[in-house]
Image: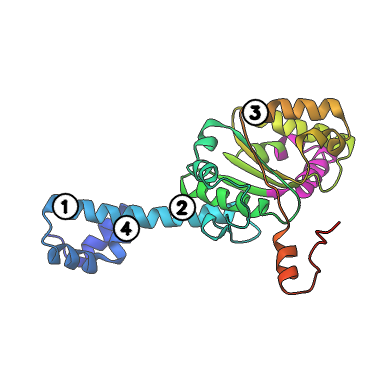
Amino acid sequence: MADHTQMEAMLSRLKLTAIRDQLDTLLDEAARRDLSLREALAYLCEVEIARKDQRRVRMGMSIAKFPSVRTLDTFDFDAQPSVDPKTIRELATGRFVANGDAVLLLGPPGVGKTHLAIALGREAIERGYSTLFVTASSLLAQLAVAHREGKFDERLRHFAKPKLLIIDELGYLPFEPEAAHLFFQLVSRRYERGSILITSNRAVGEWGNVFGDAVVAAAILDRLLHHSHIIAIRGDSYRLKQKRRAGVVPAPDTNN
């Protein structure tokens, strides 16, 4: 019969580190519950799987490069009645990622688009989908530099790899004509292969102005809208609401 040291060595070899690190505690708990051998084995497996899931999620969060911590639990749906909680919960299941669909979160600045994008990205990671977050300006800058240096294909593969690519703040700055073509190549590479979630302050009808080329914009939208979920968020900025409550910014004049 193996002693404690031998058990730890075997568990290390099998990479069952959660069971190894808590071996005595877990065995005592199984005995306290009077578990059968089958039940005890299932209990130990549950503990090991939970540890591995935690590590996987932590690594996924690190790779995603989210700029802040945001969750669906902290999103104020009451403050944004134009956002349907059922629709967001459906997106949180990750089925849109599995299907390679696009999600467009549209609305003025400050209404919670980035919050929802990060929160949905976290949910995707929880469900095992690789995710990457990048602002539109950073994305285009990286693609442009790579194009000039002859490394465009390499950078394109980088942004094409994750199952979910989140592009934040599209439309705040206009694209250069060359940048619009580079963005089109990225969208084409990911089309029906990987999901894209985009936040934008511009309605899709204005994207011709954003990209500086109506033909390229139409080609991009043709691919994005083929399998898509569009959420238009209306209302005032959270930050403006807070400032108004604090008296820093006057309330809008409703008499005019």
Residue at 16 percent of width and 65 percent of height: 3
> Which amino acid, by three-letter code, is at mark 2?
Arg
Find out whether residue 149 is within the magenta segment.
yes
Q: CA distance from mark 1 to mark 3?
A: 46 Å
Residue placed under numbered mark 3 in the picture: 191
Answer few, some or many: residues within 10 Å of disc 1's Cα (few below 14, many 20 plus, some between 14 and 19): few
Foreground: 15 or 77? 77
The mark that comes first in sequence, 4 or 1, is 4
The mark that comes first in sequence, 1 or 3, is 1
Dot 1: what SS? helix
- Report the magenta residues as a range: 134-155
Residue 190 in the image: x percent, y percent?
65, 31
Q: CA distance from mark 4 to mark 1?
A: 22 Å
Question: Is most of the magenta stretch helix, strand or loop?
Answer: helix
Give the image quarter of residue 31: bottom left
Residue 253 in the image: x percent, y percent?
83, 61
Dot 4: what SS? helix
Determine whether, in the image, residue 163 is placed left or right of residue 42: right
> Which amino acid, by three-letter code, is at mark 1?
Glu
Which of the two marks, 4 or 1, is nearer to us in this view? 1
Answer few, some or many: residues within 10 Å of disc 3's Cα (few below 14, many 20 plus, some between 14 and 19): many
Which of the two marks, 2 or 1, is nearer to us in this view? 1
